[in-house]
């Protein structure tokens, strides 16, 4: 009997897990592949939420998360944890995703054992090494380490070609659209009690998220103050904010936004709840990467709480606007969306530059060709 090709997917945070889940499920269906999953556990609770929803049982769990962890400890724990795992399982290919510290450390760990790396969601660039920090440098480094590069868009592939990266570059679409197609539907009923009883028809609702390292300190305070002014000045407006568990976010958010009428701080939602909440809100304010891809596909305007984006496609299409991290700029951008119907209508056109829901199929095709060669 022919032995199976061993492929190991390594991920550790919520967004990686959401975007790798459909690929892990697709790999499992290939008869000639043994699909292994190693999670670092860079996120604990938020990772487990995703694993549960997509029924993924990891073969290995490094369980590295610590309270208020720093980048060095994520890196060293991942490198030290993965070395014996890769020696034992000896995969032919390691799949990593995006730009987290789990991903760059896993790619380096594989490189140290001369195991080829495939990079899912390759080629996104802001061109500023400190923004997003450390993600921009993480993904640049992964591009040097990887041999297969799965770029969501043609522009992402062009970035990689300009950098003369080694290996094969393929435009596949983003696997997040594959995931989104399975989670959102009109008759969805929320599990979360607050959301189940929430009347989305009785006024505008903003979905807010913010967690990025470069927004720690003054920017997160300014974001909170802008949002607070918005609910105070716009009767009927509600804001729902699932707050990231990072203490660097929890602390200022609780300090600035506790007990404000119509401003609801809730715990992180599982991905299906989140996607359906996004589908029912009026618009999104966020510094998240993933939300910038999902919301446009659902026809929801997005105000980006950052000074740049590595996802310019939806900005060009007109559904995403960079609002910055200053209180006044954020307030004015949201105020305009709440009061200018034409602007809202222009931004609420559903566009989906990130794929047709068949990214996994294309990625599998590339992997099969590579295995065959
Ligand atoms: C990480 C990624 C970031 C990604 C984000 C998605 C890096 C450097 N950063 O940032 O690119 O956008 O995930 O959310 O890889 N925590 C918990 N429970 C959890 C998860 C986190 O309590 O399930 C707390 C812990 O105290 C942890 C802290 O949050 O130490 C920070 O987690 P960390 O992964 O270091 O940073 P994120 O901001 O989540
Ligand atoms: N998300 C979620 N629950 C939440 C907040 C976000 O499931 O409470 C999902 C979101 O829909 C998207 C992903 O998490 O798929 C984005 O993750 P995050 O914003 O943490 O990271 P980023 O994309 O910025 O790296």
Image (cartoon, grey):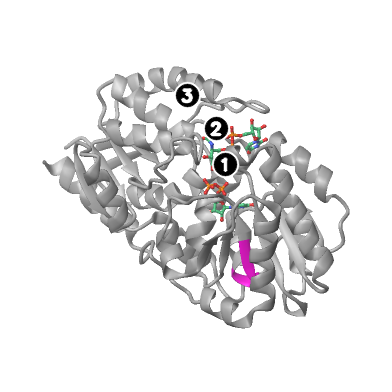
Tag 1: Cα neighbours inside 10 Å, few (<14), some, or many (≥20)?
Answer: many
**Residue 281 among those drawn in magenta:** yes
Which residue is denoted by mark 1 in the rendering?
47
Say left or right for 20 vs 345.
left
Question: What label sits on residue 89 in the rendered view?
Answer: none
Which residue, as the protein is rendered here, is positioned at the far bottom? 342
Compared with 318, 75 (above or below) is above
**74 in the magenta segment:** no
- Secondary-structure class at tag 2: loop
Q: Is residue 353 above or below residue 46?
A: below
Rendered location of residue 177, percent (x, y): 43, 61
* Disc 1 + disc 2, Cβ < 8 Å: yes
Residue 241 in percent (x, y) is at 71, 55
Quadrant where the C terminus is found in the figure? top left
Q: Which residue is mark 3?
A: 78
Q: Which residues are magenta?
A: 279-284
The residue at 55%/72% (across/down) is: 185
Label 3 environment density (alpha carbons within 10 Å; few <14, some 14–19, many ≥20): many
Q: Residue at x 69, y 37 (%)?
A: 217
Query: Does the numbered disc 1 mark a residue whose Cβ is under 8 Å from ligand 1?
Result: yes
Real-space Cα separation, disc 2 to disc 3, in angstroms = 9 Å
Q: Does the rendering let one see residue 282? A: yes
Q: Residue, x 36% and y 23% (percent of image)?
A: 109
Q: The N terminus lies in which quarter of the figure?
A: top left
Q: Residue at x 56, y 70 (%)?
A: 300
Instruction: Answer above or below: position of 77 versus 252.
Output: above
Provide the secondary structure element on which disc 3 rests.
helix
């Amino acid at each position: 009997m022919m032995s199976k090709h061993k492929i190991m997917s390594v991920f550790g945070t919520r967004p990686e897990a959401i975007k790798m889940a459909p690929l892990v499920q697709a790999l499992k269906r290939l008869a000639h592949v043994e699909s292994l999953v190693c999670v670092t556990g860079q996120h604990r609770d938020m990772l487990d939420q995703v694993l549960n929803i997509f029924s993924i049982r990891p073969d290995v769990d490094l369980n590295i998360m610590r309270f208020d962890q720093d980048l060095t400890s994520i890196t060293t724990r991942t490198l030290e944890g993965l070395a014996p795992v890769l020696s034992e399982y000896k995969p032919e290919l390691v799949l990593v995703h995006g730009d987290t510290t789990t991903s760059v450390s896993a790619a380096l760990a594989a490189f140290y054992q001369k195991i080829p790396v495939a990079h899912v969601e390759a080629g996104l660039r802001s061109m500023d090494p400190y923004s997003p920090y450390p993600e921009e440098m993480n993904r640049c480094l992964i591009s040097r380490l990887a041999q297969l590069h799965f770029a969501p868009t043609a522009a992402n592939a062009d970035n990689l070609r300009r950098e003369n990266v080694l290996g094969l570059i393929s435009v596949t679409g983003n696997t997040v659209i594959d995931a989104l197609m399975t989670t959102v539907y009109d008759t969805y009923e929320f599990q979360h009690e607050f959301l189940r009883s929430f009347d989305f028809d009785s006024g505008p609702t903003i979905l807010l998220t913010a967690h990025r390292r470069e927004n720690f300190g003054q920017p997160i305070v300014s974001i909170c103050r802008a949002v607070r002014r918005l609910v105070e000045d716009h009767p009927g407006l509600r804001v729902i904010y699932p707050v990231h568990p990072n203490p660097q976010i929890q602390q200022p958010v609780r300090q600035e936004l506790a007990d404000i009428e119509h401003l609801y701080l809730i715990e992180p939602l599982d991905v299906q709840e989140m996607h359906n909440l996004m589908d029912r809100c009026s618009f999104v304010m966020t510094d998240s990467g993933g939300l910038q891809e999902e919301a446009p596909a659902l026809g929801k305007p997005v105000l980006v709480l950052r000074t740049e984006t590595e996802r310019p496609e939806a900005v060009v299409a007109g559904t995403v606007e960079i609002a910055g991290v200053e209180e006044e700029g954020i307030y004015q951008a949201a105020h305009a969306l709440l009061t200018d119907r034409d602007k809202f209508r222009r931004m609420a056109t559903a566009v989906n530059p990130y794929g047709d829901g068949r990214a996994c199929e294309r990625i599998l095709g590339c992997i099969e060709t590579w295995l065959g060669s």
